[in-house]
């Protein structure tokens, strides 16, 4: 069992490594297509003589051929050096380390909320035990998936400030107050419900549950009076949920850019927004790479879970 | 000799299984969703054409400092913004922000998605691996982050941005078609047509793409348009897409922000409503039609 999982994880790691290599290549190609002399990234071209600029260019290896430059860039990345931010001059890796865990927390909790909402809705509507609840939840899921997430954020901020007299914005400094400690939950709530995937996730889960519920083993389980849940959770929930986590992570990370901007959440999404504003592309390259890494990790988790549940899937 | 069989009918509450099998209400929901989608698409096209022709309820750029932040009234059907511009007129002009770029995005993803899908479906040994790799590559990157990277590098306009989004949608279209063709290829009538010497182009064009693929392509088109609208409005909200004073639904929401927190909720809400209605209008039919389209494939 453990060996099967290990093999699967290894296979997935190799595939992810290959894909990440292609990602870095694509990013480097984009970088070299971008207008502007890359040497101006490092020195002030106006204040130096052309000879001095040439010397810097040579020193940085910018006068070499494309594959050589790519190789040098890649080896620096492999050593954890993602360059320095054009705006702050700080190492990109350090910025990402400081903001990354906040975004991981935000998107991770939001994902849990999305899956929780969708699972309840899908279960209720697949079993049709509480039809009115099921249709109410399905309808609100559809409405939520069309609501612009920033507007939902405004509404929540407005309600919190006027009704509960608290301001749900993360400021670096900690504040006192009765409800202030719970304020980090507000962006999680907004991203979890407003990321636009709720209805699709629900539909996917419901379809899966409906198929599983008509299986013979479920009928047998019911006939002998066993708990439905015990026979349902593996095929009905664990399998689809693990693949949904993998496939919806990119949407969560994209949604985090907007939600973090609305709530001033000091995470990677806000950093991406600021970097795009400043054309700070070393930072954005780093964020893209980290995002790709996180998404591939999600795929690895999915493969491992599915092989653990159904060893037949191991190849 | 005769056999007697006695039927005993037991009247009881419908069991779980009977309820699962009767899904009549869901069929009704499907036609409602499709009708709503058609309505929304027609509304967007109408608003776009009217705004192009200049037949607007008011001048979208005319300020009226005597009528700021107004709620809907007979004079301003959707109210006014913080400098007294008519929100309905601006919302109608706002369709221009995504209409043609969105069509470009959808067109690119359908055209190249079809091309690669057909190649990978018909000649899997040669093309399936590259298409699959491209798909996994695109699935490994969040679209919004990729778009922000492109924005930082090239400062593109909204056409180029949505073109990039269209390119990222190529592999999912290709994969859907590939899967469909892979099952169709095993059907005897396709084999027969090919064996009888019907030109492959005709088999692909008529029997596969037209008779079986149009559902998938239609779903991809509607979902792609919904996504284009979502991305355009989000980017314009963030300040990267369409810039003030050119209206976009996204930057209209952003402009109302300060007033929203002071309790004048309408200025941001008025443009949020068309976003909600159109995104749902493009996603809903795709959402309910997709299972049908995929079912017919298998």
Image (cartoon, coloured by chain):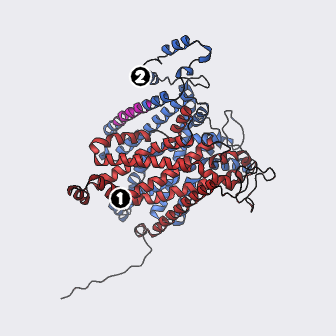
Chain colours: A blue, B red
Tell me where residue B27 appears, x and y as whole percent.
45, 67
Of discs 1 and 2, which sits in the foreground?
1
> How many numbered dots are placed on residues in this image?
2
Tell me where residue A8 appears, x and y as whole percent.
34, 38
Residue extent of the magenta highlight: A9-24
Whether residue B30 is situated above or below residue B237 in the rendered picture:
below
Whether residue A38 is situated above or below residue B293 in the rendered picture:
above
Chain that bears disc 2: A
Residue tagged by mark 2? A71
B273 inside magenta stretch: no
The residue nearer to you, when weighing B157 against A276, is: B157
> Residue A290, can we see it?
yes
Query: Which quarter shows the C terminus of chain B?
Result: bottom left
Chain that bears disc 1: B
Residue at the spot x=28%, y=46% of the render?
B123
Q: Residue furthest bottom?
A: B1
Residue tagged by mark 1? B212
Q: In which quarter of the image is residue A99?
A: top right
Task: Indicate which disc residue B137 carries.
Answer: none
């Amino acid at each position: 069992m453990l060996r099967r999982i290990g093999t699967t994880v290894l296979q997935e790691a190799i595939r992810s490594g290959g894909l990440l290599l292609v990602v870095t290549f694509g990013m480097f190609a984009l970088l070299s297509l971008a207008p502007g002399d890359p040497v101006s990234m490092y020195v002030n071209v106006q204040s130096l003589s052309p000879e001095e600029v040439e010397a810097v260019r040579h020193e940085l290896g910018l006068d070499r051929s494309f594959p050589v430059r790519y190789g040098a860039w890649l080896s620096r990345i492999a050593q954890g050096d993602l360059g320095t931010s054009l705006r702050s001059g700080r190492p990109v890796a350090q910025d990402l380390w400081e903001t990354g865990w906040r975004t991981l927390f935000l998107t991770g909790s939001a994902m849990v909320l999305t899956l929780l909402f969708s699972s309840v809705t899908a279960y209720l509507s697949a079993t049709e035990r509480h039809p009115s609840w099921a249709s109410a939840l399905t309808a609100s899921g559809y409405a939520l998936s069309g609501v612009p997430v920033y507007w939902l954020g405004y509404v929540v901020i407005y309600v919190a400030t006027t009704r509960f007299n608290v301001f749900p914005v993360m400021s670096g400094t900690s504040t006192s107050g009765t409800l202030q400690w719970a304020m980090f939950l507000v962006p999680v709530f907004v991203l979890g419900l407003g990321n636009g995937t709720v209805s699709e996730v629900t539909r996917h889960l419901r379809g899966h549950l409906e198929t599983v519920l008509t299986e013979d083993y479920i009928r047998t389980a019911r006939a002998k009076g066993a708990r439905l849940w015990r026979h349902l959770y593996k095929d009905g929930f664990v399998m689809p949920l693990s693949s949904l986590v993998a496939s919806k992570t990119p949407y969560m990370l994209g949604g985090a850019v907007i939600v973090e901007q609305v709530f001033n959440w000091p995470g990677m999404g806000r950093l991406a927004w600021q970097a795009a504003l400043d054309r700070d592309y070393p930072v954005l390259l780093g964020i893209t790479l980290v995002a790709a890494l996180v998404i591939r990790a999600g795929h690895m988790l999915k493969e491992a879970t599915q092989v653990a549940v159904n060893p037949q899937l191991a190849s | 000799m005769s056999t007697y069989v006695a039927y005993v009918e037991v009247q009881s509450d419908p069991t779980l299984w009977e309820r699962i099998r009767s899904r009549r209400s869901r069929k009704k929901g499907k036609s409602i969703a499709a009708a709503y989608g058609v309505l929304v698409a027609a509304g967007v096209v109408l608003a776009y054409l009217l705004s192009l022709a200049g037949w607007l309820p008011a001048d979208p750029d005319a300020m009226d400092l005597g009528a700021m932040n107004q709620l809907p009234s007979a004079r301003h059907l959707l109210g006014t913004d913080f400098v007294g511009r008519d929100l309905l007129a601006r919302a109608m002009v706002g369709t221009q922000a995504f209409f043609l770029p969105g069509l470009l995005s959808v067109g690119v993803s359908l055209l190249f998605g079809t091309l690669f899908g057909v190649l990978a479906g018909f000649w899997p040994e040669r093309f399936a691996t590259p298409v699959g790799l491209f798909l996994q590559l695109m699935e490994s990157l969040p679209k919004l982050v990729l778009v922000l990277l492109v924005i930082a590098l090239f400062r593109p306009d909204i056409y180029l941005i949505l073109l990039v989004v269209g390119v990222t949608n190529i592999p999912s279209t290709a994969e859907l078609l590939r899967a469909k063709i892979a099952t169709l290829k095993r059907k005897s009538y396709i084999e027969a047509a090919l064996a009888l010497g019907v030109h492959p182009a005709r088999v692909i064009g008529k029997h596969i793409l037209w008779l079986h693929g149009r559902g998938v392509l239609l779903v991809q088109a509607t979902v792609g348009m919904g996504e284009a609208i979502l991305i355009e409005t989000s980017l314009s909200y963030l300040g990267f897409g369409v810039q003030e004073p050119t209206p976009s639904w996204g930057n209209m929401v952003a402009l109302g922000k300060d007033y929203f927190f002071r309790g004048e909720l309408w200025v941001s809400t008025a443009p949020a409503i068309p976003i909600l209605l159109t995104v749902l209008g493009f996603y809903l039919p795709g959402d309910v039609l997709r299972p049908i389209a995929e079912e017919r494939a298998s």
